[in-house]
Image (cartoon, helix red, strand yellow):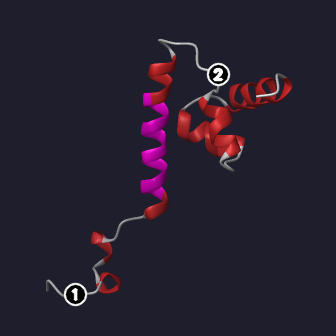
Amino acid sequence: MANTPRASRPPEEAIDLARSAAALVALLAAEREERLSQTDSPRRTEVLLSDAGLTPHEISRLTGKSFAAVVKAIQRAKGSGR
């Protein structure tokens, strides 16, 4: 079975790439937020994720922050020219 193509793996072995990617982003965002709490960073995590193309709803789910807090952070950054 070592030569079994990935497409023929049983469903229980399949990895949901979207969920895995979301989990990784959430972990990285949490780590970054922890570091930011110790320093004053010029770019907030919400802004970086927004610039990467994520919606405020997606950012909210990934960071665990409220939708309103995410939107406010993005609006503040746009207003300050960041």
Pointer 2 residue:
42
Q: In which quarter of the image is residue 59?
A: top right
User: Which label sits on residue 60?
Assistant: none
Q: In this view, does 20 lie above or below 75?
A: below
Position of the N terminus by quadrant: bottom left
- The residue most toward the left is 1
Q: Is mark 2 on a helix, strand or loop?
A: loop
Q: What are the residue bounds of the magenta stretch?
A: 19-31
Rendered residue at 58%/40% (across/down) = 61
Residue 40 or residue 53, whichever sits in front: 40
**Horizontal and vertical percent for residue 71?**
75, 31
Most common SS among magenta residues? helix
Q: Quadrant of residue 10?
A: bottom left
- The residue most toward the right is 79
Pointer 1 residue:
4
N-terminal label among 2 and 1: 1
Position of the C terminus by quadrant: top right
Residue 54 or residue 48, whichever sits in front: 48
Evaluate if marks 2 and 1 touch, with contact meaning CB atoms under 8 Å apart.
Answer: no
Q: What residue type is labelled 1?
A: Thr
